[in-house]
Image: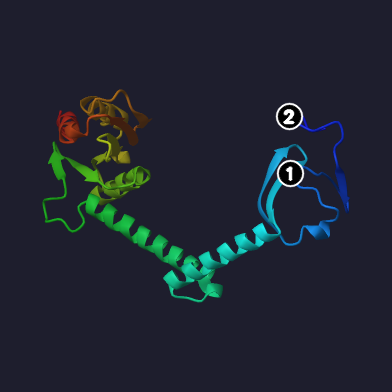
Amino acid sequence: MLFGEKYGDEVRVLDIGSSREFCGGTHVARTGDIGLIKIVSESASAAGVRRIEAFAGEAARRYLDAQDKRVHAAASVLRVTPVDVVHRIETLLDERKKLERELAEAKKQLALGGGAAKGDEGISELGGVKLMARVIKGINPKDMKGLVDDGKAKLGSGVVALVGLNEEGRAGLIVGVTQDLTKRFNAVDLVRIGSEVLGGKGGGGRPDMAQAGGPDASKAEAALQAIKDAVAA
């Protein structure tokens, strides 16, 4: 019995090889009457029970004809034969991934001042401590930590504070402190100072790396200035 299904007092059951099936569709005298059949979906409907949906007969022929037309249309757009469509798509996807990696790397370099004029990299020195403070756009939030690590490596010794802006007007703040300075500066304390300016609350992480956010991206420069003041103090 399948609970939730509606059947009459008698249910037609078919044995097909080792499989026993309810016949819930159009009744035929024999499977050969069905003709061509094309399964278009398969899913689990209960433990040990799977549901399949298919086109049969003339409907199956129409479905396969439509699929054939789609393949030929795709081949025409890709300028290959239908048999090479999958290979061409795989090649294009590989090329796209390569370009995305190159673009992400270029954005990282720009975010850290690569290609900028000397003295325009957002690096200053406050009380003998180097500080890189920059507002960046168009960087995936997942890449922010990597940017801070790159910034720390570039400074050798110092503090890195980056504010990333998104299209929704929110800001993400991340602060990194090189290991030799963690006894003087705590990244968690610094990130909380910046987050408060951005309208956020709190922030967390480790003494050498912390992050937070805030709803007011317009205060990005002010947040960085607050961190600069804290470092200078």
Q: Give the alpha-carbon distance from disc 1 to disc 2, as whole Å.
A: 15 Å
Q: Is residue 186 visible?
A: no
Q: Quadrant of residue 207?
A: top left
Coordinates of residue 87 in the picture (x, y in percent): 52, 70
Mark toward the viewer: 1 or 2: 2
The residue nearer to you, when weighing 46 against 187, is: 46
The residue nearer to you, when weighing 78 against 209, is: 78
Coordinates of residue 180 in the picture (x, y in percent): 30, 39
Q: Do residues under tags 1 and 2 come within 8 Å of each other at their CB atoms?
A: no
Q: Is mark 1 on a helix, strand or loop?
A: strand
Hey, what amino acid is under mark 1?
Answer: Arg
Question: Residue at position x 48%, y 71% from top?
Answer: 75
Question: Residue at position x 23%, y 42% from top?
Answer: 158
Coordinates of residue 217 in the picture (x, y in percent): 22, 34
Hey, what amino acid is under mark 2?
Answer: Gly
The residue nearer to you, when weighing 196 against 161, is: 196
Residue picked out by circle 1: 50
Question: Residue at position x 82%, y 56% from top?
Answer: 31
Q: Is residue 201 above or below residue 26?
A: above
- Quadrant of the frame with the C terminus: top left
Whichever of callouts 1 and 2 sits on the residue coming sooner in the sequence is 2
Residue picked out by circle 2: 4
Coordinates of residue 70 in the picture (x, y in percent): 51, 64
Q: How crowded is mark 1: few (under 14 residues within 10 Å), some or many (20 or more)?
A: few
